[in-house]
Image (cartoon, rainbow, N blue to C red):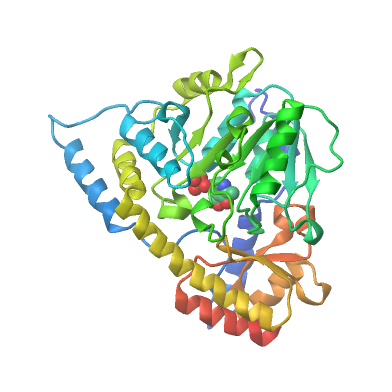
Amino acid sequence: MELKINTNVNFSKLSENYLFSDIAKKVKAHAAAHPEDKIIRLGIGDVTLPLTSSVTDAMGKAVLEMGNKETFRGYAPEYGYDFLREAISRHYKRFGVSVPPENIYASDGAKCDCGNLVDIFGDNEILIPDPVYPVYLDSNVMAGRKATLLPTGEQTGFLPRTDGLAEKPYVVYLCSPGNPTGAAFDREGLAEWVRFAAQTGSLIIYDSAYEAFVSEDLPRSVYEIDGAEEVAVEICSLSKSAGFTGTRCGWCVIPGAIRAGGVPLCKLWERRQATKFNGVPYVVQRGAEAALSETGRRESMDNIAYYMKNARVICSMLKERGIFFTGGVNSPYVWMKCPGGTSSWEFFDLLLSRAAVVGTPGSGFGKCGEGYFRLTAFGSADATKEAVARIADIL
Ligand code: PLP
């Protein structure tokens, strides 16, 4: 039945197709037409290694507590249990950063925080790098906001720059190491954004979901940069670092010093979360606490080392073939240029039809991603080697 209510018209302004559902459709069609092909997926950025034993032990213990009248817990605090906020605060000390637990807000993941943060802002000039994780743009479009895209490319190392921006206040999204390009800011590059934000009264929303993949001497947190605690909110997640994509736990940091419209920004977020969020499940928070412990972090870093070996396999083949790429060093993503000037989707089709390998067309992350292609290191070692051999055959 057609109702007579109004729906949110902003949804009609979203780009029509969702990248991963288009990919899924094409893969399904290929599998139906070629049942003999063993398709290898290096497309979606999901992890494949299971949760580590310190995490599952902690969660198992927490499950038993929930089944016991003496230790059962109901609603979790909206901003996270103290034990988790303190564990996250200690985690920041690993890279020399002091973030007080009361500025940390646990959540069910970075995607949710990216989407939900929009609630606390009014109309602003919004800057979003291109190409980038699509959630920043789409969540703003759903809220009826427009954003200016900051073009990036080979000349800028796929990192957005402040050059040429008018000196006025913005809400700027930065992601480092970046999805999909794997490009990561150095301290000077990030400091330039922090300086710009301080000069213009702008806010940086910094997504550090891939911090654990940083292997070079590069910032893992925006708060490694002096003054960032005055201008930057940070969103982070255990999805990629500790395999929590299906377990769901992340956090955002909103420093108490950041004020806008006469109020601390964190007060707006606290109000928003208290109204619309009822906390991360206790069992998950215990798992997250364990993931951030010394043992948990060591186990996670072993998993990351496994993925990064895959990244090296992909990168060395591309190097041998003389194909331009970024990423794969501080990031599980390898961002390659499509050979012979093919478009992102043409290369997707070629790879699927001739090598039965699935990657992600760069154009799905923004106009500046056209002509590029994302491969992920999250597969198994054997599948990655096999995929790389097949790709090498057709390049
Ligand atoms: N931020 C970036 C840059 C991502 O690439 C992703 C997932 O792919 C997320 C956030 C989502 O993380 P979560 O699983 O914590 O929602």
- Which quadrant holds residue 339? bottom right
Q: How many marks?
A: 0
Across and down, in percent, residue 188 comes to 69, 47
Across and down, in percent, residue 346 comes to 76, 70
- Which quadrant holds residue 228? top right
Q: Is residue 63 left or right of residue 171?
A: left
| Quadrant for the C terminus in the image | bottom right
Q: Farthest residue to the bottom: give it.
A: 393
Across and down, in percent, residue 4 comes to 66, 23
Answer whether residue 297 is visible to the viewer in this image: yes
Q: Nearer the viewer, residue 142 or 85?
A: 85
Q: Is residue 47 above or below residue 252?
A: below
Answer whether residue 48 is visible to the viewer in this image: no
Residue in the image at 79% along x and 58% along y = 153
Q: Is residue 330 left or right of residue 54?
A: right
Q: Nearer the viewer, residue 7 or 381?
A: 381
Across and down, in percent, residue 140 comes to 68, 34
Q: Farthest residue to the top: give it.
A: 262
Q: Is residue 233 above or below residue 343?
A: above
Residue in the image at 78% along x and 61% along y = 154
| Quadrant for the N terminus in the image | top right
Q: Is residue 245 above or below residue 232?
A: below
- Which quadrant holds residue 371? bottom right
